[in-house]
Amino acid sequence: MTTAGTSVVHARAPGKVNVFLKVGAVMEDGYHDLATAYQAVSLFEEVRASPATDFSVEFSGSIDISGLAVDGTNLAIKAARALARKAGYRGGVHLDIEKNVPIAGGMGGGSADAAATLLACDALWGTSATKDELLAIAATLGADVPFSFTGGTAIGTGRGDQLSPALAKGKFQWVLALADFGMSTPEVYQELDRHRDRHAQDIFPAEHQPSVDANVLQALRAGDPHMLADVLHNDLQAPALHLAPGLGKVLQLGEENGALAGILSGSGPTVAFLVADADSALELQVALSASRLRVVRATGPVHGARLI
Ligand code: C5P
């Protein structure tokens, strides 16, 4: 229940594309050891938090929001509850979330909801948590939540939640082809494991830690889309294509219509195309839309979670 006449705190957090993602061995906690390069992109989740006695969430937005859980299993509610627990806050919050990042698309939309919720609730409740405290809570909520909190360009290791900033110049232009279905991240990882089991020679040795290619860091530092296009890589792409073979056609269509390169975003099914400039982005958007794909454009890197 919302308390009438009280202030609302507005926070915003971005979605992401993984421009490089290498998956290592399964760790003791069941997660895979990762090396990834994240880029925050200009699709933002807008979270408005208002005082309430309990915890509730409502969605609106530019994308189809049907089927989103609004109970305690929702990541934004989990984020608010986690902060309340940590800070000893006894009240609740009502969250209004405007979604612009594709749902179950591999772009970290749920993670962005959680990151913005942490910031909004901290301000609303006056809990004055430090950035490190909020990041520690973020890491308990999901592998991508800390990155949505920090934004920009960063290297993620461990589950993807151990972040170190990466230097990046300029803005990269992305054209994102959205699927009309979602994909389950655990299922894509399981498909990768099955593939590695079937081809024993491909099993990632546990002692061998994955790392981000130096060429990726160089391309990001140079701000050069042509260089970056040559080194885009995602280990989750092959297993995702195995589960959803139609995505292969989408990748092909983009590359035939001016994309420098296409890559599955995270565990998919969103396909991210890197283009040379804003004009090529528009042309590609028109071409993909003509093939009845839902397409949005975005630029990156952008800032992480912040109060508006
Ligand atoms: O942390 P998050 O909830 O986003 O992860 C979803 C699922 O993806 C995990 O439960 C796990 O199955 C898989 N995952 C993984 N290794 C990672 C990140 C995610 O196996 N580093």
Image (cartoon, helix red, strand yellow):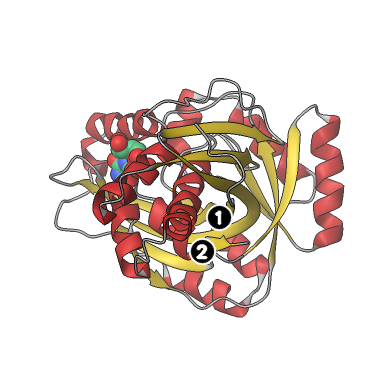
Q: Where is residue 46 drawn, in percent x and y?
A: 61, 48
Tell whether 24 sits left or right of 55: left
Residue bearing mark 1: 13
Mark 1 vs mark 2, foreground winner is 1
Say the numbered circle drawn on residue 239: none
Ligand 1 in which quarter: top left
**Does residue 79 lie above or below 194 as drawn?**
below
Residue bearing mark 2: 151
Q: Where is residue 193 drawn, in percent x and y?
A: 27, 34
User: Which quadrant of the figure contains the C terminus?
Assistant: bottom right
Q: Is the Cβ of the residue at disc 1 closer than 8 Å to that at disc 2?
A: yes
Tell whether 263 sits left or right of 250: left
The first of marks 1 and 2 along the sequence is 1
Q: Amino acid at mark 1?
A: Ala
Q: Residue at x 25, y 52 (%)?
A: 88
Q: Where is residue 117 drawn, in percent x and y?
A: 47, 49
Residue 106 shows in the view: no
